[in-house]
Image (cartoon, rainbow, N blue to C red):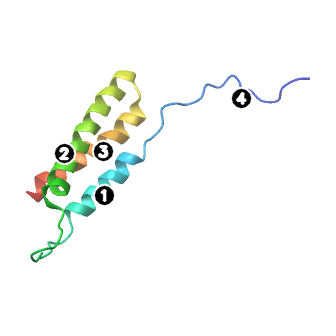
Amino acid sequence: MQRTSDDDRTPPVKDRILYWPIVLSAFWYWCLTLPPVEYSEGDLHPGPVLILAAPMLSFAIGTLLCVYWLGLGAWRRLVSTLILPITVLLLLYFEY
């Protein structure tokens, strides 16, 4: 019996586009561009953790992953992860 396809010979593609950096970039854009809210005494507000520390942490993790993807030669993952640090830098530059 002969095979009709060469699927066994085709190597699987392990380098694919990652979606989580794009979603996280959109989330930080949404968080940092919300209009300012007047808080009264006793209200909970996000404070500096959400405004500055969390985006900078995601910037650092995204940069480290970009260096890792560059070392592996995974260009699609590199470009899709590079969106996160660039977006965070631009948001913080234009916001502050």
Helix, strand or loop for disc 1: helix
- Measured in 3D between alpha carbons, the distance from the residue under mark 3 to the one under mark 1, in whole angstroms, is 13 Å
Q: Is residue 22 left or right of residue 35?
A: right
- Measured in 3D between alpha carbons, the distance from the residue under mark 1 to the one under mark 4, in whole angstroms, is 39 Å
The disc labelled 1 sits on which kind of residue?
A: Phe
Helix, strand or loop for disc 2: helix
The image's mark for residue 27 is 1
The residue at which mark 4 appears reads as: 7
The disc labelled 3 sits on which kind of residue?
A: Ile
The image's mark for residue 56 is 2
Measured along the vertical axis of the image, is residue 22 above or below residue 40? Answer: above
The residue at which mark 3 appears reads as: 83
Question: Answer yes or no: do the residues labelled 3 and 1 have beta carbons within 8 Å?
Answer: no
Give neighbour class at mark 3: few <14, some 14-19, many 20+ (Cα, 10 Å). Answer: some
- Counting residues from the start of the chain, the first of labels 1 and 2 encountered is 1
- Counting residues from the start of the chain, the first of labels 4 and 3 encountered is 4
Quadrant of the drawing holding the N terminus: top right
Q: Is residue 70 left or right of residue 12?
A: left
Residue under the point 59% across and 29% down? 12
